[in-house]
Image (tube, rainbow, N blue to C red):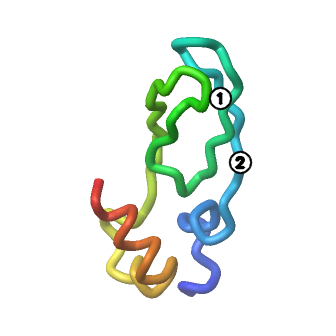
Amino acid sequence: MRDKCGGAANLRTPTLKIKRCPECGREIEVFSTDMEIKCGKCGFVIYNEIESCIQWCKYARECVGDELYKKLKKT
């Protein structure tokens, strides 16, 4: 079942979103595994709204791997 987990699909295979910097309007590439990204033009920090099973699933570490688990668990 863990190899079919839909909740972690965007974490194991990151997706890309383009957001606009609210400060200067520049397009910023944000991957689904990025916690925050800094605008290359003005330096404004944009936060990603990551909602994942990392916070509650007991299999999360096995599912996404130790490195990504630690990165996302910090929040």
Separation of residues labelled 1 and 2 (CA atoms): 10 Å
Residue occupying image coordinates x 46% and y 48%: 50
Disc 2 on helix, strand or loop? Answer: strand
| Of residues 1 and 16, the one drawn nearer to the viewer in this rendering | 16
Corner quadrant of residue 5: bottom right
- Residue 10 image position (x, y, % from top left): 62, 60
Amino acid on which disc 1 is placed: Lys
Q: How crowded is mark 2: few (under 14 residues within 10 Å), some or many (20 or more)?
A: few
Residue occupying image coordinates x 48% and y 82%: 65
Amino acid on which disc 2 is placed: Leu
The residue labelled by disc 1 is 19
Residue occupying image coordinates x 51% and y 40%: 37
Residue 16, which numbered label?
2
Disc 1 on helix, strand or loop? Answer: strand
- Residue 31 image position (x, y, % from top left): 63, 50
- Left or right? Give the position of 55 relative to 23: left
Residue occupying image coordinates x 64% and y 22%: 20
- Residue 9 image position (x, y, % from top left): 63, 66
